[in-house]
Image: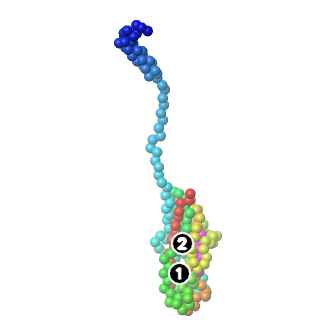
Amino acid sequence: MEHLIKRPKRTLAALAVALAAVGVTVGSGADFTSQAANPSNVFAAGTLTMTNSAANAAVFSPANMKPGAPDQTGAVDIKNTGSLPGTFSLSRDSVAVTDAGAAEDGGSMDRKIDLTVTDCGLFSGATPPSCAAGTVVYQGALADLPSKTLGTYAAGDQHRYQFAAHLDGSADNTYQGDSVSARFVWDAIQTP
């Protein structure tokens, strides 16, 4: 050990060579490696859209109504054209009444229109369902139609709805010449 201290430069040189040899031995070890990749991952949002066979038009326009006469009818087809299922609903808004009788009898004509809305059912391909076997989703005065939940439509589901209306038999002379218009609104919200 004494001779190592007498020649410090040689000792440092020998120590540096020994450390370098250890580093090469440890660092030069070959390791097997592997890697796999999944490129082009695309994240796309689904859609919830609908078509309405009578879009921006009246479902029906009952005319020349008289108290107690049979129903006048109209139909509309509503389809989920999106990729996601949704809960569909129907409501009524924007009621406009031209009603000379309202002041005389305390009621407006929208209370004298008896409305029935029937879900005729789901289309089978392009074949519409029969409304005779449908399910009534609303029956009452036009004025009282609330927002009605119609159920969940899967992507591609299409239903036909029949609207039927008549002037209530209790309407008297004060309703002659009166009219009412209403807008029916279809809404959908994605299901969880």
Residue 181 or 165: which is nearer the viewer?
181
8, above or below 171, in the image: above
Query: Which residue is painted at 60% across and 66% down in the image?
Result: 121
Residue 22 or 142: which is nearer the viewer?
22
| One can see residue 2 in this view | yes
Query: Which residue is painted at 50% across and 79% down in the image?
Result: 95
Amino acid of disc 2: Ser
- Mark sitting on residue 13: none
Amino acid of disc 1: Pro
| Residue assigned mark 2 | 91
Q: How crowded is mark 2: few (under 14 residues within 10 Å), some or many (20 or more)?
A: some
Which of discs 1 and 2 lies nearer the camera? The answer is 2
| Residue assigned mark 1 | 62
Q: How crowded is mark 1: few (under 14 residues within 10 Å), some or many (20 or more)?
A: some
In this picture the colour scheme is rainbow
185, above or below 14, in the image: below
**Range of magenta residues:** 114-119
Name the main secondary structure of what is drawn in magenta: strand
